[in-house]
Image (cartoon, rainbow, N blue to C red):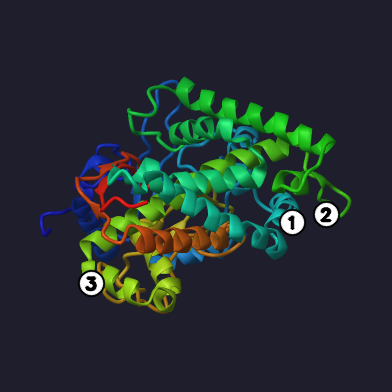
Amino acid sequence: MTSLTTDAIDLSDIEFWAKPEAEREAVFQFLRDQAPITFYDEILIEGFPQGPGYWALTRYADVMHVSRHPELFVSGRGGTNIGDIPQELAEFLGSIINMDDPRHKKLRGLISSGFAPKHLNQLLEQVQVRAKGVVDAVAAKGECDFVSEIAALMPLQIVCDMVGVPPSLEQSVFAQSNIILGVGDPEYVQSYEDLMGAFMTLHQMAMELGQHRLDNPTDDITSILMHAEVDGERLTVPEFASFFILLVVAGNETTRTAISHGMLALQENPDQKALWMSDFDRYAQDAVEEIVRWATPVIHFRRTATQDTEISGHPIKENEKVVMFFNSANRDERAFERPYEFDITRSPNPHVGYGGGGPHFCLGANLARREIRVMFEELFMRLPDLEITGEPARLQSSFIHGIKRMPCAFTPNG
């Protein structure tokens, strides 16, 4: 698109995120080549002062630099979303992703106890059981919505299993997480009140659950988290509630997004689907990583500079915001050969689908990998001819690369 100019591009414009993916990809390719670090004004939100703007980082190396220098670029000055919010509110809404050391290290240390290998291993058999149950529920239908009836269900059920949310509340968790990560899409969020209402619903659920497990421990991760100690300190119930929101929202949405985009990519690249189905175990590990690179469920995170510094020779002043566009980094020709090809044999694949490393690398990465692998294994075995039969309805969002609905059909069985 030779007609592109930097003046014509505005990554803050929500209408940009409603454009077809090919158009957006062309814009990011142009920025990587011509203006890899560009300043943008922030969107004006009614009732809030307009923020000071931000530097958009579109190259892989710059995203990695910011991720791996937490002393220079922090999360705890207004949060990890582009717009500033008071730090206390940022921690309430985002838990550890909106914190820096030493508080981040303390809470992540406590939370990590629930994600230790021995606890995660207990979940592996449950992932298989849940994936089988999801496919069982649709196998005889011959058609369904791939997102709500397949991709979304297993991650939702697993995260609810982990923290002890009863099945009767699973759909409430699903609905509230859709609202929280649907900002920008009028189907999910019409007002600030909608957003805060979803947060408060989940927060109240988590407060009650955390207190109950503190008083009556079981063998779920909530009980482990509420009773874990690091240097004599424990999570408070409000700290657990904030992490609960992060876990049920991120653990649900990002994995379903990866599975949805993965199935769409396999449909559009039938040679890759045939290759993977020819020897599932041989290709599974690399295929899962390629699905996450291809999908890049979280589009961006923001950091704030702690001092005057520079990125690739570009001066950044203290307190200026930098926004890491993971979607662009995962298509950077400087880091990946043939980045616009979906290749399940791609190796190495140092994508930033779970972040760029550093202290905020995704705690749930290994569980997400397991869920993606098991779901595709179950689908290939039980519904091998599944096809996407209509155009996906995509989430209008600058934050989550989501698919809302995607019809599919297959030969009924079972």
Badge 1 vs badge 2, beta-carbon distance below 8 Å: yes
Front residue of this view, candidates 236 and 357 = 236
- Tell me the mark number nearer the camera, choosing from 3 and 2: 3
According to the image, label 2 marks what residue? 230
Is residue 349 positioned above or below 3 on the image?
below
What's the residue type where badge 1 is placed? Answer: Ser
Q: Residue under circle 3?
A: 271
Under mark 2, the amino acid is Val
In the image, which is nearer the foreground, mark 3 or mark 1?
A: 3
> SS of the residue at dot 2?
loop
Residue located 42% across and 64% down the image: 377
- Residue lying furthest right: 232
Q: Secondary structure at mark 3?
A: helix
Disc 3 marks which amino acid? Asp
Locate residue 188, reporting x and y percent.
Answer: 38, 29
Q: Label 1 belongs to which residue?
A: 113
Note whether 2 is above or below 289 in the view shown.
Answer: above
Is 119 left, or right, of 128 in this rendering?
right
The residue sitting at the left extreme is 3
- Quadrant of the rendered structure where residue 247 is? top right
**Element class at badge 1:** helix
Q: Residue at x 48, y 27 (%)?
A: 195
Alpha-carbon span between mark 3 and mark 1: 41 Å
- Of mark 1 and mark 2, the one earlier in the sequence is 1
In the rendered image, the vertical position of residue 375 relative to residue 96, given as above or below = below
3 or 1: tag closer to the N-terminus? 1
Residue 194 relative to residue 68: left or right: left
Q: Residues within 10 Å of mark 1 (few under 14, many from 20)?
A: some
For the residue pair 276 and 85, the one nearer the viewer reads as: 276
As measured in the structure, the alpha-carbon distance from the residue carrying label 3 to the one carrying label 2 is 50 Å
Q: In the image, what residue occupies the spot 38% across and 38% down? A: 42
